[in-house]
Image: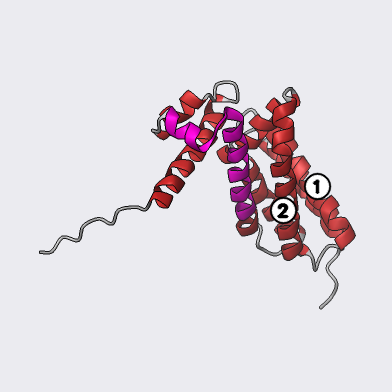
Amino acid sequence: MTVTPAQRRTQAERREGTITALLDATVRCLAERGYAATSTAAVCTEAGVSQGALFRHFPTRQALLVATAEHVAERNVEDFRTTVDTGVDTVDEVVVVLGRLREVVLSPANQTWRELLVAARADADLRGAMLPARESLQAQMLVVATELWGARLPADDLAAVLSIVVNMLDGLAFSALDPDPTAAPGRTVERALRLLAEMIVSRYPQEPR
């Protein structure tokens, strides 16, 4: 029996693996412990990486947090694309899309954004450092929305409709004590999503094919 030796990872692969481990650990720390308790020491313990290794890739805690926001943004865009790639011709279909989007918004990874946005309100340096990531996320979300729904919604209204949907779901996430989408006040939220779906469909009726 011939045993094939395990292929050693390249330096670039090891570097990428360490960075990914640190970013994923930061996401978990922010979601489970909150902004204040997400120290570089806590992240290193969670990731199983030394602080020396962390600072080789991220010179400051803020650099790590901003990179984590960008990391989550990329994931959110992909989740957005795969989650809502479905029909939006009827109220029921739009309700399904909104429900799936709410699950993405309530995900532990997206909690990263809420923790950092709240912290940035009182930290001008963090607020400025996060601005490019926020603008990039908004632009990418609009591109995906255009690809999915550009034929249904007028170009002049698409960004506004996306803003209404995202802000509503973010507001629900900020006010939710329990991240479980089925938790109370589930019925009120479900009704709110259906009302929003009804307004969207009635405002932009599908033209006969």
At mark 1, the secondary structure is helix
Magenta stretch contains residue 76: yes
> Quadrant of residue 5 in the image?
bottom left
Numbered mark located on residue 101 in the image: none
In the picture of the structure, the residue carrying the numbered disc 1 is: 163
Q: Position of residue 121 (x, y in %)?
A: 75, 26
Q: Is residue 175 magenta?
A: no
The number of callouts visible is 2
The region drawn magenta spans 51-79
User: What secondary structure predominates along the stretch shown in magenta?
Assistant: helix
Report the amino acid beneath label 1: Ser
Which residue appears at 63% of the width and 46% of the height? 73
Taking the image as shown, residue 139 lies to the left or right of residue 105, namely: right
Which of the two residues, 202 or 33, is positioned nearer the viewer here?
33
Of the numbered discs 1 and 2, the one sitting upstream in the chain is 2
Residue at the spot of label 2 = 141
Q: Residue drawn at (46%, 48%), measured in percent from left and top?
A: 16
Q: Is residue 175 left or right of residue 15?
A: right
